[in-house]
Amino acid sequence: MSRDRMVKFTLKSTEDLAKMREAGKAVAAALKAMKDAAQPGVSTLDLDVLAGEILAGFGAVSALKNYQPPFSDIRYLHNSCISINNEVLHGVPKADRFIRDGDVVKLDIAATFDGWCADSAITTIVGTPKSPKAEKLVSVTRASLYNAIRKAVYGNTMGDVSHAIQSHVEKNGFGVVRDLVGHGIGQTPHEEGLDVPCYGRAKLGPKLVVGMTFCIEPMVTTGRGTVAHTGDDPWTIISADRTLGAHFEHTVAILEDGPFIITAAERSDEPAAATAD
Ligand code: MF3
Ligand code: CO
């Protein structure tokens, strides 16, 4: 059996996508509020509580709270993941973990609206960046996501998407994380069977078809891209070489007329939101 035939995934209807979009709007608003509130002295738990409030205002709830992801034996207990500096992702909000000037902060949320999920992440530098390299890491990681989204087109392959991430990151001297991948999404935050690696070769991998929904999430470090657990908790993943990490993520649907960014911020020019932040 070819690799393509072994891939299983669910295709979403217009109605399903409309609900995912409502979840996506809530996620985008929560990320924006968290970003604005991420100032020196604020705790990561404060930001997590804020995320829950914003989601509630949209009639959504966190899809992470009490969720047991496929890669874990236990449930996650917070609304969001907040990871700082050499923490790349899945950082756990804490009442005694305070944001400091210059921190490279990753904010990651998944929400559920009427049973349907959306998942997105951003990286922001608080206050004054500590180095030009930190700024470059964030801009390169962000650009690699949008390059990849432009390849998320009916008829292309997942390899085209993955390659867009890897080539942009490596051209700029940074490393992609290989131990973790983007994922299918729908009525759960992680649908099995549709991996979205941050590395790959153009034209290889499963063909993209209309109705697919998945999360593209470049995870990048200024080092080699190798990662490890901190050991402080079962969740937080750091760069193995302790270099800075960045992470951006959007939930994307493959539509007939191109990629639709389910987690884009609400814009007056919807539904042409495929170019939105
Ligand atoms: N958005 C995160 C991801 O796709 C969700 C992590 S699941 C959690 O990896 F349980 F760790 F929060
Ligand atoms: Co994700």
Image (cartoon, rainbow, N blue to C red):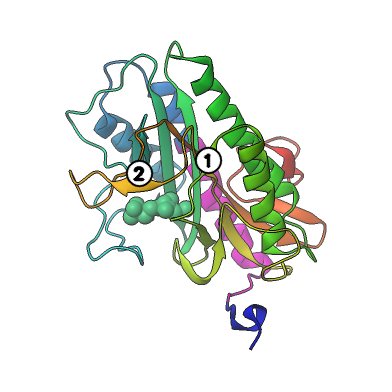
Is residue 15 rendered to the left or right of residue 258?
left
Is residue 23 rendered to the left or right of residue 244?
right
Give the SS element for disc 2: strand
Q: Tell me the kind of residue under disc 1.
A: Gly
Q: Is residue 134 visible?
A: yes
Please say if 80 is above or below 158: above
**Looking at the picture, how far across and down is residue 84, in whole percent?**
35, 31
Of the two numbered discs 1 and 2 on the same chain, state the one appearing first in sequence. Answer: 2
Total residue callouts:
2
Residue 54 falls within the magenta-colored stretch: no
- Ligand 1 within 8 Å of the CB at mark 1: no
Question: Looking at the image, which residue sits at the far bottom?
Answer: 1
Is residue 113 rendered to the left or right of residue 70?
right
Which residue position is annotated with label 2? 80
Please say if 233 is above or below 38: below
- Ligand 1 within 8 Å of the CB at mark 2: yes
Residue at 47% x, 45% y is: 58
> Residues in magenta?
9-30
State the quadrant of the C terminus.
Answer: top right
Which residue position is annotated with label 1? 175
Give the SS element for disc 1: strand
Q: Tell me the kind of residue under disc 2.
A: Ser
Mark 2 is surrounded, within 10 Å at the Cα level, by few (under 14), some (14 to 19) or many (20 or more) other residues, namely many
**Looking at the picture, how far across and down is residue 262, in whole percent?**
61, 51
Please say if 259 is above or below 58: below
Q: Nearer the viewer, residue 122 or 243?
A: 243
The quadrant in which residue 153 appears is bottom right
Residue 15 falls within the magenta-colored stretch: yes
